[in-house]
Image: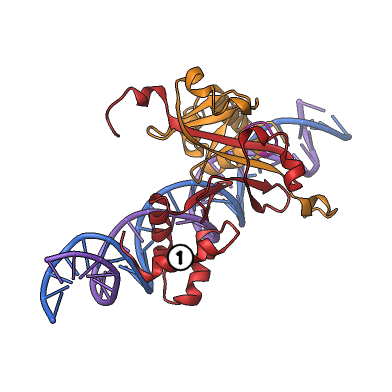
Chain colours: A orange, B red, C purple, D blue
Amino acid sequence: MRFSRQRDIVLNVLQRTESHPTAEWIFDQVKREIPSISLGTVYRNLNQLADGGIIQRIFDNGHVRYDGKMDQHDHFRCIRCQQIFDVHLRLEDITKNIPQDYGFKVTGYALEIRGECHQCQTKETEQ
Amino acid sequence: MRFSRQRDIVLNVLQRTESHPTAEWIFDQVKREIPSISLGTVYRNLNQLADGGIIQRIFDNGHVRYDGKMDQHDHFRCIRCQQIFDVHLRLEDITKNIPQDYGFKVTGYALEIRGECHQCQTKETEQ
DNA sequence: ATATTAACTAGGAATAATTCCTAGTTAGTT
DNA sequence: AACTAACTAGGAATTATTCCTAGTTAATAT
């Protein structure tokens, strides 16, 4: 991955926000510094940065958002204002300590576990 | 919500599969019974059923899939074949028992907790 | 410093997923 | 049987994202 001013600013915009913005929001911010930047460039760079493990994608009700923080953390979504907050917790804490620690009222959660299924572990072929 | 043949067949198709299909896949299945059905009808019904708590939406890397099972369960995605499997577990089991119980090799997970943030709990106004 | 070139960019067209619109139909009620 | 709100098919519109092309530039070698 080569250095480019566009990628540098995309990354900096993302790392400087506490929010979990969409590509469109990042595009608007980056335009303040590089008015000629194109939306395709923002998407390309976000994908490259995410594929390179420098930022992460988060999935918000079928829409993609981005997160510049790479430490292990989870997200809390408010079902009323739809804001996404960062939370740092161990799994054991999920049902117990969140309300006290963060002031959140927890009504549910969605967990997706990732890894390799049995079938794929026993196959050598990379798809 | 009124009964319609279209909604009934959409629901039955979804409840009969073990997979977590997209709207398009459901559309193709329903067409076998109602060849004239339109994709918009499938989307409308899936949304109504999900909003009514009869089915659930699941979010697959920024794409929407549907799940006809409403019991509390989680999902396991194979990072190689991309299949999504149902898993029934308590949160405490996540890091411990999955590999043994299901034969999965766990490499990560994404957890989204839902509820009301402090700000929204103290506001009376419904947005 | 300059030349080289693979990786990049802007701009816009193309694609994919989903929602919206309209005129006609139908399930449930009276 | 008549009524009507909720539904439908079909297709246009919208939204999010990717793709394409000709020109530009960061990193490397000379």
Near-viewer residue (A35 or A70): A70
Q: Is residue A116 shown to the viewer in this render? A: no
Which of the 4 image quadrants contains residue B46?
Answer: bottom left
Q: Report the residue that reaches farthest toward the top.
A: A101
Q: Is residue A125 above or below residue B107?
A: below
Q: Chain of mark 1?
A: B
Q: Residues within 10 Å of mark 1 (few under 14, many from 20)?
A: many
The residue at which mark 1 appears reads as B10
Tell me residue B45's x, y (percent).
Answer: 40, 60
Range of the magenta residues? Answer: A51-55
Q: Is residue B82 above or below residue D30?
A: below
Tell me residue B117's x, y (percent).
Answer: 42, 26
Near-viewer residue (B10 or A2): B10
Tell me residue D28's x, y (percent).
Answer: 83, 32
Near-viewer residue (B26 or B71): B71
Q: Magenta: predominant secondary structure element?
A: loop
SS label for mark 1: helix
Near-viewer residue (C2 or B68): B68
In the rendered structure, the answer to whether residue A31 lies left or right of residue A91 reads left
User: Where's the C terminus of chain B, which quadrant?
Assistant: top left
Total marks shown come to 1
